[in-house]
Structures are given as structure tokens and as C-alpha cells.
Image: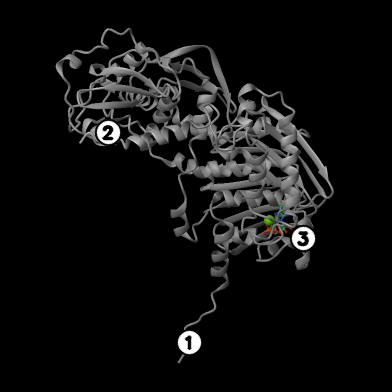
């Protein structure tokens, strides 16, 4: 009887192996770019069609291939970079496994022309789904040009895992900009669908390159850092507090010019900033760490995004000390100084025990959220607050309440007796049979969110800026921003492309007129993770509006005058879905008479 085990054909094993190396178009870009750098290229041109899903072309001016190396390079484990295992720990090249070209060629169609410097003629090869179709002599410039098409055609199921072309292009640009950061001396240009999206001239100055890639915003807040230790070198730039971002995407670490994501390095960076920046905010940091190849194992991750250090402590210590020292030399603002005295994770805008106090207060009263029908005596209904002056911090205009369909008669805050503000955050009201606590931030947030949403499509709520604000964005943010422009416009933020990587903000809604529009937009972009960028238009709009509402809303721990409180109540009364803020937190809670009596043991 014959057994069940078969030896898989070579083509199939290549395709399976390619799964590890080539996850998406960006992985192809990464491998080709690294090959070009390994070949000593000083200029690289990249062309993408359909976000890299249609075509990827990379042209370099590196050393090129010798003619008889051309077919070899497409075989598995074919490399010019190592000859024995231990060489892995000596290589200074990006590649060494000899996997990239055969992997890419096994899941796509690859056409390559190449000529070594000094050679009379070049070579052209076409490999389709792992099969060499032809090799010919050809005339071509020095260097190598590789064109990859029909990506994932031989393994169509892989296409189902791809995201939209915009997203895939974003991933490609991420790879390119990261690589560009660590190689300022290499000139890089990128065309996407025939349009030049990146043009980065060669420079010897890392900060100049950072400016082009991370945007001028970041440049205004840079602090250089440098350290030399035995066998260890580090240079880079870090952002000065209070410049921060809402996520850690701007923490770029490179080890021997290889971009890596490493918990240890990020932890060291955040430790150095401890107490200098607010909780859940991140600095922007670019660190280039160089150490002998033997002190780092790069052969631990398929895409080489993680590494293992021989002496992790030394590296950790160097980062924390160098960064902390550089930061300590800055003149300290009062805020930062205060923050320094508090444990990491504390929010320095509030007293240290603020959170605890509220938590305790809530527990003490075991409050329940309001959903029941409420009734008020006539005297209260008449409203003691109605004579208050006009609201502040809100755009003018009518809010329709036609679509309200709450299952109970909504609370009318203007009709309640206002007792005052507690903890500079909660407005306290008294009604016939209960006490009501209103969260001023959540309430205002809901009001603004509904205003933004309801206004959808209508124009003219924006106010022209006297000095239009020009923002320099990273290529990926630029793309996302441009896509989101119609949504922003609905919210009254009018923007236009300004050439290159810039956009200009021309008008903003009145509610944002007091705010730093630059910070607002940067926070907005930062709040969209890669997966969030896939959200449908409606969800994306929701998220944008929620964020704008949150930013513009009156903060907790902010004293409100009585007229301000009254205005807030009036606005809230006109707002549908007023019981919860756009994030789903309750806007108000009630303390019933029964609950109070029970707690005071009156019954
Ligand atoms: P690895 O980079 O791990 O060696 P690859 O499959 O990426 O494996 O490349 C195989 C070999 O092809 C490399 O070792 C190198 O000699 C050669 N090669 C690849 N790309 C280029 C290029 N752009 N210019 C010159 N040589 C290249
Ligand atoms: Mg390679």
C-alpha cells in the first residue's frame, strides 16, 4: 500500500516560503530597496501603480549583476553576502538569506535589466511565477531595474488579504520613508500612479532629511543627541517637551541602519521622558544606533523587524542616560517641572489625587445613570435659569430636534434648580425627587458633536483664518488628509493642497478659533491608526467629529460661571441623544430620593 506523504514540488515550496517574506506589496518594496542599498546605490527611483498592487518598479544605480549571476539570484538560498553560518554575525548588509528575489518571483512576474559598471552590455531576465522565461543580452544603464507585476496572481488567495490600494500605498511609503531616514546620503524619488509623491535629495545632514520626511513641525522642536561608548554609537534627534504626539508611531529606532520595532528601545526612550510629558502622549524620536554586527542577531524575524542584542543592558542604559541628560538641560517650563514630580501616568493638569477623589465620590453615592421618566414641579419647570445671558464657546445656528425619539421624556436642564459646580467638573442640580450631576465636558462634547453631525453638508460655518496655516505632512498623512478633506469641510475646516507635502488650512469653525489648529490637525491624523484609516466614510466622519467635539469642548477641572452653566444647559436641552457623550460615557447621573434615604438610613 502506498503512503500518504508526498514531496511538494519546488514551485510550491517557493510559494509557501514566500508567504513569510512577501506579505504585501510593501514587503516587496522593502526587499528591493534593501537590495539596492546593499548594492551600494546612491540614487533610487521607485514607481508604484495601484498602491503597489498593480506594479512595483525600482531602479538603482548600484553595482549591478554579473551576467552569470543573474539566473542564480532567482534561485533559493542564492546570495553573494554570506558563505558560512557565522558570516551572519559579520554581515553589514541588509540581506543574507538569499530568499527575496526567488520569493518575489514565485508569486509574481519579475522583469529585470542590469549592468555592472564598466560592462559593455547588460542582461535582461524575465521570471514568471518562479519560471525563468528568458534571459537576453541587452543595452541598459549601469545599475539595476526590477519591475514586478501580476503580484500574487499565482497565489490569488493572498490578494484577499490585501487592503485598499490607498492603504497598501501607505504601507509602501512607510517602508520607503523609514529607510530614507536612516540613509540620508541616498537620493530617493517615488512616483505613484504617474505622480511624483516623494522627492528626497541626498544630504549628509540627518536633520535635513528628517525635516523632509517628518515635516517641518517636528523640526522646530528638535534636540540633537549623541553618545559614543565602547563598541556602541548613537546619534539622532528627539523632540522637546511639550511637543508630543498621541501615539508612538514617531518613535523610529535603527540598529546598524536597519529599522526595527523593539520594545526595549521604546521602553528606554519613554523612560527618559518620564515625567516630562503627559500620560499617553509620545515624543517623536529618531535614533540611529550602530554596533558591531556580532553584537546583534538579526536572524530572528522573517522580515528582520526585530533583533536580539548581545548586551541589551548597555544599550538600554545608553539611551536612557543620553536622552534624559539632553532633556534635563532644557529650561523647564512650570508645567513640565510639576509633571516631573509625579509618577509616570499622572495627568499633570489636575491635582494628583483628582482621579481618586472622583472615583471615591462616585463609589460613595453608588450612582445610577438616568433613564427613567422624570417629573418636576411646576415652579422648577418655569425655570430659574432662563434669564441667563447668551452662551459662549458655541457656534451660532439652529439645531433641529425633529429626529429625537427617546423612549422617555428628556430631562430639561434649564428647568432644573442649579446648585453649582462641584470639583470644577460636575454641575449639580436639584429636582423634586433627585439630585443630578452633569459632566460638563461630556455634555459639551455631545452638544458639539450633534451640531457637527447635523450640519453635515451645509457650508459656511467655517471662519476664514487671517493667516492661513500651512502644514507639512508626511506622505502617508498627506494622502489620508486629502482623502478626508470633504469630511473636514463639512465640519467647517476648509483646506487645500499646497504643493509638495503641504496643505493649507484656510478656515476653521468658530468653536476652534481659540485653538492651535496645527495641533488639532496633527492630533487628528495621529488618532487614526492604520486600521482606522480603513474605516468607511461614515465611521471615519464619526471619528473625526467625535475628536473635534472632544477637543473643542470645555474641559473637566475648569471653573464655569453661572451664565456659562446656563448656556450649556440650554444647548443640551436642544440636543438629541443627550444622555451619553459621543464616546458612550454618561453625560449625567442621578441620585434618587430613595437612594439617598436608604443611605441616610431614613428608611
Ligand atoms: P539576499 O539579499 O539575501 O542576498 P536576494 O534574493 O535579495 O538575497 O538577492 C540575491 C542576490 O542578488 C544578492 O545577494 C545580490 O548579490 C544580488 N542582488 C539583488 N538585488 C540586487 C541589486 N539591486 N543590485 C545588485 N545586486 C543585487
Ligand atoms: Mg535581499
> Which residue is rendered at x = 43% and y = 54% of the image?
160
Residue 424 in view here: yes
Q: Which mark is residue 600?
A: 2
| 3 or 2: tag closer to the N-terminus | 3
Residue 293 on image: x %, y %: 78, 55
| Distance Cα–Cα, label 1 vs label 2 | 81 Å
Report the number of numbered marks: 3
Left or right of 9 on screen, residue 232: right
Q: Which mark is residue 89?
A: 3
Indicate the secondary structure of the residue bearing disc 1: loop
Residue 351 on image: x %, y %: 52, 28
Left or right of 37 on screen, residue 544: left
Give residue 84's quadrant in the image. Answer: bottom right
Q: Nearer the viewer, mark 1 or mark 2?
A: 2
Q: Nearer the viewer, mark 3 or mark 1?
A: 3
Residue placed under numbered mark 1 in the picture: 3
| Residue nearest the viewer, comparing 515 with 191 | 515
| Classed neighbour count for the residue bearing mark 1: other residues with Cα under 10 Å, few (<14), some (14–19), many (≥20) | few
Q: Which mark is residue 490?
A: none
Q: Nearer the viewer, mark 3 or mark 2?
A: 2
Amino acid at each position: 500500500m502506498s503512503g500518504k506523504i508526498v514531496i511538494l514540488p519546488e514551485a510550491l515550496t517557493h510559494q509557501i516560503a514566500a508567504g513569510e517574506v512577501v506579505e504585501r506589496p510593501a514587503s516587496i518594496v522593502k526587499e528591493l530597496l534593501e537590495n539596492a542599498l546593499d548594492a551600494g546605490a546612491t540614487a533610487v527611483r521607485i514607481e508604484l501603480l495601484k498602491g503597489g498592487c498593480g506594479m512595483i518598479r525600482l531602479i538603482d544605480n548600484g553595482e549591478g549583476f554579473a551576467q552569470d549571476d543573474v539566473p542564480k539570484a532567482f534561485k533559493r538560498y542564492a546570495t553573494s553576502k554570506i558563505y558560512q553560518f557565522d558570516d551572519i554575525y559579520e554581515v553589514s548588509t541588509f540581506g543574507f538569506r538569499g530568499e527575496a528575489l526567488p520569493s518575489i518571483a514565485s508569486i509574481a512576474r519579475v522583469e529585470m535589466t542590469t549592468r555592472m559598471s564598466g560592462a559593455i552590455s547588460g542582461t535582461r531576465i524575465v521570471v514568471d511565477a518562479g519560471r525563468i522565461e528568458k534571459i537576453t543580452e541587452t543595452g541598459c544603464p549601469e545599475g539595476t531595474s526590477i519591475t514586478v507585476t501580476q503580484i500574487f496572481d499565482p497565489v490569488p488567495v493572498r490578494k484577499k488579504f490585501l487592503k485598499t490600494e490607498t492603504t497598501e500605498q501607505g504601507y509602501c511609503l512607510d517602508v520607503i520613508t523609514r529607510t530614507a531616514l536612516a540613509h540620508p546620503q541616498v537620493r530617493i524619488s517615488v512616483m505613484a500612479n504617474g505622480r511624483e509623491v516623494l522627492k528626497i535629495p541626498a544630504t549628509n545632514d540627518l536633520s535635513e532629511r528628517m525635516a523632509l520626511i517628518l515635516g517641518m513641525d517636528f523640526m522646530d522642536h528638535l534636540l540633537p543627541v549623541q553618545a559614543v561608548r565602547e563598541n556602541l554609537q548613537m546619534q539622532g534627534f528627539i523632540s522637546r517637551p511639550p511637543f508630543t504626539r498621541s501615539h508612538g508611531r514617531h518613535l523610529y529606532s535603527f540598529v546598524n541602519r536597519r529599522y526595527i520595532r523593539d520594545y526595549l528601545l521604546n521602553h528606554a526612550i519613554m523612560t527618559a521622558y518620564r515625567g516630562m510629558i503627559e500620560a499617553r502622549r509620545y515624543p517623536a524620536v529618531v535614533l540611529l544606533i550602530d554596533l558591531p554586527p556580532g553584537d546583534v542577531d538579526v536572524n530572528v524575524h522573517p522580515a528582520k523587524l526585530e533583533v536580539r542584542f548581545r548586551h541589551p543592558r548597555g544599550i538600554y542604559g545608553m539611551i536612557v542616560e543620553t536622552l534624559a541628560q539632553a532633556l534635563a538641560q532644557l529650561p523647564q517650563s512650570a508645567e513640565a517641572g510639576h509633571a516631573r514630580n509625579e509618577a509616570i501616568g499622572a495627568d499633570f493638569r489636575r491635582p494628583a489625587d483628582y482621579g481618586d477623589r472622583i472615583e471615591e465620590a462616585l463609589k460613595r453615592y453608588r450612582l445610577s445613570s438616568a433613564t427613567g421618566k422624570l417629573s418636576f414641579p411646576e415652579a422648577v419647570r418655569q425655570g430659574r435659569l432662563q434669564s441667563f445671558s447668551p452662551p459662549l464657546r458655541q457656534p451660532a445656528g439652529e439645531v433641529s430636534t425633529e429626529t429625537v425619539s427617546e423612549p422617555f421624556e428628556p430631562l430639561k436642564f434649564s428647568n432644573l434648580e442649579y446648585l453649582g459646580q462641584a470639583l470644577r467638573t460636575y454641575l449639580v442640580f436639584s429636582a423634586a425627587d433627585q439630585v443630578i450631576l452633569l459632566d460638563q465636558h461630556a455634555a459639551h462634547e455631545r452638544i458639539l458633536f450633534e451640531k457637527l453631525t447635523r450640519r453635515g453638508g451645509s457650508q459656511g460655518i467655517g471662519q476664514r483664518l487671517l493667516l492661513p496655516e500651512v502644514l507639512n505632512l508626511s506622505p502617508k498623512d498627506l494622502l489620508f488628509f486629502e482623502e478626508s478633506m470633504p469630511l473636514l469641510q463639512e465640519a467647517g475646516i476648509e483646506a487645500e493642497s499646497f504643493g509638495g507635502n503641504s496643505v493649507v488650512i484656510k478656515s476653521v469653525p468658530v468653536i476652534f478659533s481659540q485653538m492651535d489648529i496645527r495641533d488639532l490637525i496633527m492630533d487628528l491624523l495621529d488618532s487614526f491608526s492604520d486600521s482606522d484609516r480603513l474605516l468607511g466614510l461614515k465611521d471615519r466622519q464619526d471619528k473625526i467629529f467625535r475628536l473635534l467635539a472632544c477637543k473643542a469642548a470645555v474641559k473637566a477641572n475648569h471653573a464655569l460661571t453661572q451664565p456659562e452653566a446656563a448656556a450649556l444647559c440650554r444647548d443640551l436641552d436642544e440636543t438629541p441623544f443627550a444622555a451619553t457623550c459621543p464616546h458612550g460615557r454618561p453625560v449625567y447621573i442621578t441620585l434618587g430620593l430613595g437612594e439617598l434615604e436608604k443611605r441616610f438610613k431614613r428608611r
